Amino acid sequence: MDKEQNNKKVQRIALFVVTLAIFTDMLLYGMIVPILPDYAENLGLSQTAIGILFGSYAAALLITTPVFGVISDKFGRRGPMLWGIFGLTIATLLFAFANSFWLLLICRILQGIAAAATWTAGLALLADFYPSKDRGKVMGIALSGQAMGTLLGPAFGGWLFQFGGYMLPFFVAAGIAFIDGLLRVFLLKEEPSRQEEERSGVLRLLKNRTLLMIVGAVIIGAAIPSVLEPTFPAHLQRVFDASPGVIGLLFGVPSLAYAFAAPIVGSVSTKIGHPKTITIGLAVTAVSLVLVVLPTNMWLQIAALAFIGISMGTVLAPTLPELADIAQENHTQAYGVTFAIYNTAYSVGMMLGPMISGTASDLFGLQQSYFAIGLMVLVYMLFFLVMSPLKKKPYKY
């Protein structure tokens, strides 16, 4: 009984630390959104340069995620978790003193590298400590930390910027990162080292057809919010005459809905099967992209945006435990590599979303472009339906 209670305590600590780590990462990522464009323009940077600054985060995340996946599987999760928060703290402090494009670029790249370490090792840590039957719920809770950080970051950064100028948000953010770092140092315990014989299991994992289908779903789930970012603010301004402040609040609605939906969806998916839940999520996503551009009433618009957040949670929350289950099915506990695949796919979605949305809107108009993207998601849903084992139940380990 004492051993079981101790295991549950270790599990709760791991869940708290990882959820807080993801929240902190997304909070600090979001804080920069309302500050960086204005500051960059004051430095005389072009819109292209500002776009590069925003895109460099996802590029760094994409490139370094596989590296941290391999490292965390070979040497353990604690090291990358500590390197991640150290890198994030340094990047945040450097932001306060950055006075050129190249310094800002270095900060954003370092921020992306830090996120790769934290996300990959953190999600792998949860898969290490929790059995299959609990992963849906705990992964959903971890993703709610992402949603709350995304929701609060821009408002927090904007308010501090207005109150104390450019440097204050980054000093406060560095303080938050430092506290998070202390918690990681004192609460995270090193787990046993990885086994070399898992290499054959990793190779089987990378050839798994279901894993490839999950990767596509993750790309779509990650692209959902980034589809809205470059095009939807102008739509809100045109239809509702919405101010920047109101637009910011409206963009918080999907994040809030996502935060509430992810843990619930995670628990439900454990009962009905993760692939089946993902299929439902893809269908809901296709519908939500069509509905979000139709309202001319503000309350209906809020409801449509909440529907977007729920659809994102319904797609993404089941993918994490399903990836862990696929790894165990292939007789490997190389969860670092497994969740590196998730992060890589997520990065691709973050980059593709604005590109597809912006280009399609220029070619066809906003409403038609969202309809077209929704149709693309629906086609993938049908492909997923055919190719994925929907009757598969979660593994009992």
Image: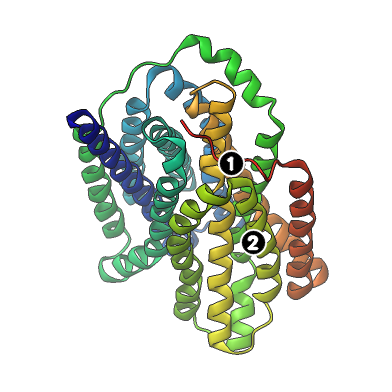
Q: Contact (CB < 8 A) between labels 2 and 1?
A: no
What residue is rendered at 42% in x and 35% in y?
131
Residue 26: horizontal and vertical position, in percent? 41, 52
Label 2: how many Cα within 10 Å (few below 14, some 14–19, many 20+): many
The three-letter amino acid code for the residue at tag 1 is: Lys
| Residue 227, numbered label | 2
Left or right relative to 111: residue 208 = right
Residue 312 horizontal/vertical position (percent): 57, 59
Q: Quick one: 280 or 219, which is closer to the camera?
A: 280
Point out which mark residue 159 bears.
Answer: none
- Quarter in which the N terminus is drawn: top left
> Residue 229 appears in which quarter of the rendering?
bottom right
Residue 358 position within the rendered picture, expressed as x and y whole percent measured from the top left? 71, 62
Q: Amino acid at mark 2?
A: Val
Would you identify the image quadrant in which residue 158 lies?
bottom left
Instruction: Residue at 70% x, 55% y: name it.
Output: 355
- Name the secondary structure under disc 1: loop
Q: Nearer the viewer, residue 315 or 397?
A: 397
In space, the residues marked 2 and 1 are separated at their CA atoms by 32 Å
The residue depicted at 51 percent of the width and 41 percent of the height is: 321
Asked if residue 64 is positioned above or below residue 53 in the image, the reply reads above
Q: What residue is shown with label 1?
A: 393
| Total number of numbered discs in the rendering | 2
Q: Is residue 51 above or below residue 302?
A: above
Q: Is residue 20 visible?
A: yes
Q: Quadrant of residue 210?
A: top right
**263 and 64: which one is in front?**
263
Q: Position of residue 155 (x, y in %)?
A: 37, 68
* Horizontal relation, residue 376 to residue 395: left or right: right
Which secondary structure, mark 2?
A: helix
Is any atom of residue 38 visible in this view? no
